[in-house]
Image (spheres, grey):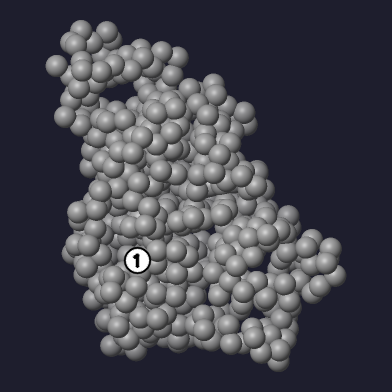
């Protein structure tokens, strides 16, 4: 007898092949049979007539390793169909944190997670410690981890703006070896953030060579995603060519004023040419025209190199504050610096959530830099922000690329008052807005980008396809009604049209509501 039969569904199996009508049976957490009118009885049945049955979605770009101990159910991911996540992105992972630079490491994590951050007694000194720590942790979705270069550099050098000594580089390599031997998928880079921005390409190549020697992968938030986007792609290709490592360009896009929009046409051609040469480069993307990151990230790297406490001291000093303002204005005008930027979450002043900096400053007749600096001081550098810096045409172009996967890149934390809706609704948004309404891609290709493609890229055994013997991580949804309800004003609205999410053959979500199941776990290579 089967444990469950899903009857009459339209199966889209994640491979990119056309869909078909069939029943699907589950036994002992795995797919036991797929066929027309399966005759055997089952302990339970779900009638999926008129609905799509697909593999559980894979969030190919997640930061949930930072909060999973505080929110192990990850209901905001399950309630959009995500059953597996790749974590440790953009150069930031939970480990390693060294004793010598403990405060720097803990401050960075705190800025991302706000509450539930590691304490002196719980932080992980090595990535292998982190793996051991989470071996017994039951979670909602499954987790697959990367070690972050920014975190490694912080552990060895703090926020120092210089090249590593030979001894420091060897220590960084040791951290990568420890992670790879503990089962990390690979290494993530985040050169747009401190201290990663201080690294030269040869440092990144040296560390990626270590990950590549274990068969690992490299993901990277490129150094440039603005008008210098093509320079960022060139550096990416240089690293991939020098190491031979499989590469994923994180949240590929071009950001800035409309003057730079459209550059993805050139960047994608560069990627195609590199793959034709024999490299192995993929992309991930979140389906929105607004970015989200920490508000402090637009400060000049020179000051961020002082560490968060050092920056705060400067922002509280009128002379230094003016110096920072002048340094920022020397690069570009205030209208460009704060173009489209709004405060997503201010822990100290929630009344400022969803406030656009330029408009608020003008309305209250205050200098926008004073507002910016004051908020950072009030929030102890922990303010998150969104910025509407992309065009729909660039989003469409990247989404259509055959090597693009879907990810959330969301920043959530316990008791979060507000966040970018991508953390809550990225996958329903693709299916509802970009497939059904905008016709950017078709439904079969969307499912492939959410399931079979990322499971192949990240070598997730048993995931990503509806095939006999595969894990029974399954999503059932109504293709005519599924849509993102979450907005920038109400980011927690559930997604209509999501009927069931199964993890290991058991119901984790019904009618878009989490049922309390924690069948997920941390996986290693």
Q: Residue furthest bottom?
A: 319
Q: Specify the quadrant of the image occupied by residue 207.
A: bottom left
The residue lying toward the viewer, choosing from 189 and 266, is 189
* Residue found 39% across the figure and 61% down from its top: 66
* Residue found 48% across the figure and 38% down from its top: 427
Is 56 situated above or below 273? above
The residue lying toward the viewer, choosing from 240 and 70, is 70
* Residue found 55% across the figure and 75% down from its top: 380
Q: Specify the quadrant of the image occupied by residue 486.
A: top right
* Residue 425 can be seen in this image: yes
- Residue 70: image location, x then y, percent: 37, 57
- Residue 150: image location, x then y, percent: 41, 72
Is 382 situated above or below 512? below
Is 499 situated above or below 514? above
Left/right placement of residue 241 relative to residue 330 reads left
The residue lying toward the viewer, choosing from 319 and 212, is 319
- Residue 127: image location, x then y, percent: 26, 67
Tally the marks: 1
């Amino acid at each position: 007898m089967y444990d469950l039969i899903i009857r009459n569904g339209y199966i889209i199996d994640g491979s990119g092949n056309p869909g078909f009508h069939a029943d699907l049976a589950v036994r002992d957490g795995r797919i036991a049979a797929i066929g027309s009118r399966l005759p055997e009885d089952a302990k339970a049945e779900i009638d999926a007539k008129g609905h799509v049955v697909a593999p559980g979605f894979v969030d190919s770009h997640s930061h949930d390793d930072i909060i999973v101990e505080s929110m192990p159910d990850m209901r905001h991911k399950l309630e959009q169909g995500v059953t597996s996540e790749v974590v440790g992105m953009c150069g930031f992972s939970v480990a390693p944190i060294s004793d010598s630079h403990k405060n720097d490491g803990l401050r960075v994590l705190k800025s991302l997670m706000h509450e539930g951050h590691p304490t002196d007694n719980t932080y992980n000194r090595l990535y292998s410690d982190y793996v051991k720590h989470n071996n017994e942790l039951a979670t909602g979705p499954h987790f697959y981890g990367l070690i972050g270069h920014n975190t490694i550099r912080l552990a060895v050098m703090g926020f120092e703006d210089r090249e590593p000594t030979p001894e420091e580089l060897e220590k960084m390599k040791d951290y990568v070896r420890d992670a790879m031997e503990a089962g990390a998928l690979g290494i993530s880079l985040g050169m747009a953030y401190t201290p990663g921005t201080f690294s030269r390409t040869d440092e990144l190549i040296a560390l990626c060579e270590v990950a590549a020697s274990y068969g690992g992968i490299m993901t990277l938030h490129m150094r440039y995603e603005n008008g210098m986007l093509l320079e960022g792609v060139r550096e990416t290709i240089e690293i991939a060519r020098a190491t031979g490592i499989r590469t994923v360009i994180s949240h590929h896009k071009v950001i800035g004023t409309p003057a730079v929009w459209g550059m993805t046409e050139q960047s994608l051609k560069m990627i195609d040419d590199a793959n034709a040469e024999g490299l192995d480069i993929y992309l991930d993307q979140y389906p929105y025209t607004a970015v989200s990151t920490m508000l402090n990230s637009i400060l000049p790297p020179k000051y961020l190199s002082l560490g968060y406490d050092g920056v705060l001291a400067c922002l509280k000093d009128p002379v230094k504050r003016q110096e920072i303002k002048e340094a920022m204005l020397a690069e570009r005008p205030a209208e460009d610096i704060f173009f489209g930027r709004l405060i997503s979450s201010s822990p100290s002043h929630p009344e400022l959530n969803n406030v656009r900096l330029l408009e608020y400053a003008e309305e209250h007749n205050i200098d926008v830099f004073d507002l910016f600096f004051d908020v950072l001081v009030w929030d102890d550098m922990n303010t998150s922000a969104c910025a509407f810096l992309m065009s729909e045409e660039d989003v469409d172009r990247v989404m259509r690329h055959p090597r693009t996967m879907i990810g959330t890149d969301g920043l959530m934390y316990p008791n979060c008052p507000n966040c970018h809706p991508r953390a809550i609704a990225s996958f329903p948004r693709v299916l509802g807005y970009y497939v059904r309404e905008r016709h950017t891609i078709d439904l079969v290709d969307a499912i492939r980008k959410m399931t079979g493609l990322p499971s192949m890229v990240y070598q997730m055994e048993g995931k990503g396809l509806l095939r006999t013997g595969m894990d029974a991580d399954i999503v059932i949804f109504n293709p005519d009604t599924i849509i993102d309800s979450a907005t920038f004003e109400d980011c927690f609205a559930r997604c209509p049209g999501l009927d069931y999410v199964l993890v290991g053959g058991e119901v984790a979500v019904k009618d878009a509501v989490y049922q309390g199941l924690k069948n997920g776990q941390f996986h290693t290579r």
